[in-house]
Image (tube, rainbow, N blue to C red):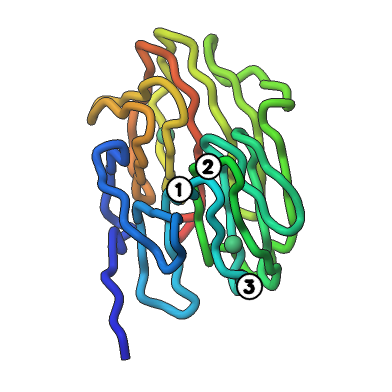
Amino acid sequence: MQTIQELNTDFSQRAVVETANMDWETSEADGVLRKRLERIDAKPEPVTTIVRYQADSAFPAHQHIRGEEIYVLEGTFSDNHGNYEAGSYLRNPAGTTHSPFSKQGCTIFVKLQQFQASDVNQLQIQTKQQKWLPGLVPGLSVMPLHEHKNEHVALVKWEANTIFQPHQHIGGEEIFVLEGTFEDEFGSYPQGTWLRNPPNSFHTPFSKEGCVIYVKTGHLGDV
Ligand SMILES: [Fe+2]
Ligand SMILES: [Fe+2]
């Protein structure tokens, strides 16, 4: 029996990872590199990762036993079903299969084996073609991507010098900074930072520089 190296498994703890400072690790596929952010020893194994496909690389065909969520950060990610340019948001629910590859190379943010059992919608959204909606305060825009029970996923765009209201994350909050620098009273999070705020945590976020973030809320514990 092989034991895996678990990572950021305590969901009651805040986690902050500046992925730009991490080294790439090799994977089982030639030319496919990764930076792991969360990894839990379970079957199937839930893992949150940044994956880089070098040009003309491929990953073996596989099934997503508990679903796979992808945001394409740069380049073009492909599988046997289509090509997904930077800005694509994909949800492949439980039972789906594919053979991923990239011709020109790409970097993707992936959350694997983390779907709720009842979340069966397959999604392919090109966020660059979607409209931004006004957010709760001036300077903030929101693009809802997915909603299932307590779980919500959106992109949020902050104009420079936007301050949001203090708030609590009842079911936790997970953020990946796509552009610019996101901030709150606990720190400053440049592009590429992954942040996980535990259930019932509070903060008052802002952005001096402006930023675009991927945000998932409500998925981290008892609601
Ligand atoms: Fe996959
Ligand atoms: Fe928040």
Q: Which residue carries the number 2 mark? A: 106
Kind of residue indicated by mark 1: Arg
* Residue designated by label 3: 63
Task: Check disc 2 and give the amino acid type.
Answer: Cys
Q: Which mark is residue 52?
A: 1
Question: Which badge, 3 or 1, is on the more N-terminal residue?
Answer: 1
For the residue carrying disc 2, how many other residues have a C-alpha within 10 Å: few (<14), some (14-19), or many (20+)? many
Dot 1 alpha-carbon crowd within 10 angstroms: few under 14, some 14 to 19, many 20 or more: many
Residue 107 placed where, x, y %? 49, 42
Of badges 3 and 2, the one in the foreground is: 2
Residue sitting farthest toward the front = 56
Identify the element where label 2 is drawn.
Answer: strand
* First in residue order: circle 1 vs circle 2: 1
In the figure, 26 relative to 107: above or below? below
The numbered disc on residue 209 is none
- Label 1 element class: strand
Q: Which residue occupies the foreground of this view, 103 or 202?
A: 103
Residues under numbered marks 1 and 2 in contact, where contact means CB atoms less than 8 Å apart: yes
